[in-house]
Amino acid sequence: MPSVVGLLEQRELGARRRVDELREEADRIQAELAVAEREWKEWAIARSRVGEVLAPADETGQDHARADGTVPAAGEQTGKTSQVPDAAKSKSQVPVWRQGLAWSTLSVDYQRILEVLADRARLHQGPLTCQEMAAAFGMDVVPARVEALRSKAKRLVARGWLAEPAPGRFTLAQGVASPGGGS
C-alpha cells in the first residue's frame, strides 16, 4: 500500500506536468497572437493608406476629405469632382444627405437601417427604436448590439438621412425615400 506522502508526490508531479503543458500552450498562443496582431495592424495601415491615396484632391494636391470622414458635396468642391470609389470607403463614413444622393454611397449596415425604415414608412407605420431594429435584423437584442445600432442611427440623423421625432425613435428624414435616387 502506497504511503500518503507518495500519493501526494504523485499528484503534485501530475499537477506540475499539467502546469508545464499549459505554460507551453500559453507561450505558443502568445506567439501566434503577436503575429496575428502585427498582420492586423499592417492591414489596417494598408487600408488607411489606400483611403488616403483614393481621396479626392484639388489641383494643389490638398485633400478634400473632412475630419468627420465625409466627402464634400459636389457644390462644395473647389477642385476636381472625382469621388472616392465605394470599395475605398470606411464603414463609418456617412456623407451628408442631399437630393439625388443614392443609398449605395452608404455601407451595407447603414443601407439595412434605411431599408427597414423605408418599409415602415411605406406601410404607414411609426418610427422604430434600436431594439426593434435589432429584432427586425434577426440580431440578439443585447445592449452591445442595440448601442451599435443606436450609434449608426444617430450618425444617420446627424447627416440628414434619418429623423428622430422622439428620443430613441427613428424614421426616414423628409425627402429620403428610395434606395436608387435617395429622393
Image (spheres, rainbow, N blue to C red):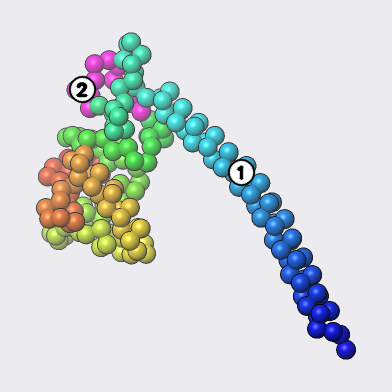
Q: Position of residue 21 (x, y in %)?
A: 74, 61
Q: Is residue 77 magenta?
A: yes
State which mark lies toward you, 1 or 2: 1
Q: Position of residue 91 (x, y in %)?
A: 37, 41
**Label 1 SS:** helix
Upstream in the sequence, badge 1 or badge 2?
1
Say which of 23 and 1 sits in front: 1
Instruction: Identify the image quadrant of the N terminus.
Output: bottom right
For residue 34, the mark is: 1
For residue 76, the mark is: 2
* Residue at the extreme front of the image, as rendered: 5
* Residue at the extreme top of the image, as rendered: 60
Name the residue at 38% across, 30% down: 85
Q: Which residues are magenta?
A: 73-84
Q: Does residue 159 appear to the left or right of 20 in the view shown?
A: left
Q: Amino acid at mark 2?
A: Glu
Q: Amino acid at mark 1?
A: Ala
Magenta highlight: main SS: loop
Q: Can residue 35 be seen?
A: yes
Q: Position of residue 111 (x, y in %)?
A: 30, 47
For residue 162, the mark is: none
* Residue at the extreme right of the image, as rendered: 1
Name the residue at 26% across, 35% down: 95
* Residue at the extreme bottom of the image, as rendered: 1
